[in-house]
Amino acid sequence: MEGVGHVNACIGLAEVLQSRGHHIVFVADQSYEGKLCRFGFTEEILTSDEKDKMPGEVAAKSLLTSGLMSGVSSYEKMKIMQNLPFLDMVVTKMRANEPKLKTIVAKHNPDVFLIDDFIGSPTLIHSKKPWVLIMSGNPLFALKDDNTPPAGSGFPTNGNPNDWKEFQELSDKSFAKPKTKYNEWMTEEGFPTVEVNELFPESPYLNIYGYPEELDYTDIRPIPEKWCRIDAFMRKGEQEFKIPDKFRERDEQKSKLIYLSMGSMGSVDVNLMKRFVAILSKSNHKFIVSKGVLGDTYELADNMWGEKSVPQTKVLPLVDLVITHGGNNSVTETFSYGKPMIVMPLFADQFDNAQRILEKGYGIRLNPYYCSEQELLNSIEKLLNDKELNERLSVASKRMLSSNSIERAAELIENLVK
């Protein structure tokens, strides 16, 4: 998928494989042209309408008119999804790019394919080479179990099963049309079709998902055969970051440093970002803000510094708290550095991540559109002053940063081609 979060997760795994002596060929959307080779990867670019755009910019801007950028429930947003052409477009775009992909595969003759996508390219999943599913979202989207809530719902794990069933039925309807379109393509090509309610293609070789063991659902369901959990798909090669000069002389006891990011998608809602600026300007703390692709269209307050894009994995170790949309990379990376979170979900697995952080006691879940000024400001103070929470997070961080889970995943990939 061309979404920023999906690509960043793949970069994290690819960096590890590269460090082990492997050559990485990265096939990506045109908006990533010139952005992947700096990691030392070979770029192969698929044609799209996103030339000269920032990664994810077109998709992000389309959300503004979709109705997903609002404070309504996950159920209402799933209803909205039924009428959006997004997944239809994914199938159409993949089919249009399939001839180019075949040429790329013939050119490089890879030993193994790593795939992060809603659907499986027949060139890859029906080749004679092993392939690996990379699940960069919340694991509920790939590992379905009757004992866990439906993906994208944000429902508690001890919730009402009747609510779960109703949401799952709605979700199945939302994905039925693109899956039917995909199956028609597979039938024409002479390949097997897939179940309509399967969101992601499960590999018979290996499937990898990224989620810290402290947050994972293994207290409810086991990790199935052919699946591997890693703590996070953490990138290492981002540019260095230093605390802005205006914040270096602050009284660190009274004025903490907080990172605000609503992700590449959420930050296109300028009115929402302005809402946060207005509220957080009343805080005694300092804020580093990832402003997003439309960052030039609004100003930050005096207690803030920001740019359109900041190197998140370099910022996180320097801050005391994170306000996030709850994207999977943001949650797992923040957790890796032991920072408390205020999670403000907008759609999809962000709801699930927000709920999991809440019910595991590692942060607070708020509605970004409806939370009051006092709710947000009080939540900041509560998390910053919760010594027990910060000690628990520190323990989890030490475990994760010393973990070799992603190296073990790399070994499993290598074993596929020995």
Image (cartoon, rainbow, N blue to C red):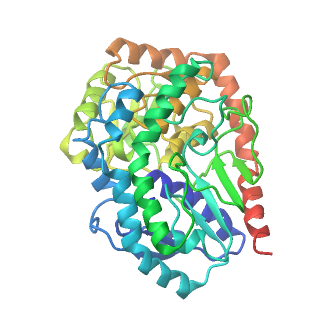
Is residue 236 something one can see in this rendering? no
Quarter where residue 144 is shown: top right
> Along the horizontal axis of the image, is 105 left or right of 311?
right
- Residue at image position (34%, 73%) is 47
Q: Which residue is drawn at 74% across and 29% down?
A: 219
Tell me if I can see residue 355 in this picture: yes
Tell me if 365 is positioned left or right of 13 in this view.
Answer: left
Q: Nearer the viewer, residue 169 or 12?
A: 169
Relative to 270, is 120 on the left or the right? right
Does residue 339 sit above or below 209 in this rendering?
above
Indicate the position of residue 9 as horizontal and vertical percent values: 55, 54
Q: Is residue 209 left or right of residue 310?
A: right
Above or below residue 226? Residue 274 is above
Q: Which quarter shows the N terminus?
A: bottom left
Q: Quadrant of residue 333?
A: top right
- Name the residue at 61% across, 52% down: 233
**Quadrant in the picture for residue 285:** top left
Q: In which quarter of the image is the C terminus?
A: bottom right
Q: Is residue 155 above or below residue 106?
A: above
Residue 210: give x, y in percent of width and height.
Answer: 63, 47
Residue appearing at x 61%, y 76% in the figure = 127
The image shows residue 222 at horizontal and vertical percentages of 76, 38
Q: Between 145 and 325, which is closer to the camera in this rendering?
A: 145
- Residue 257 placement (x, y as % from top left): 46, 31
Instruction: Between residue 92 and residue 101, name the one nearer to us.
Output: 92
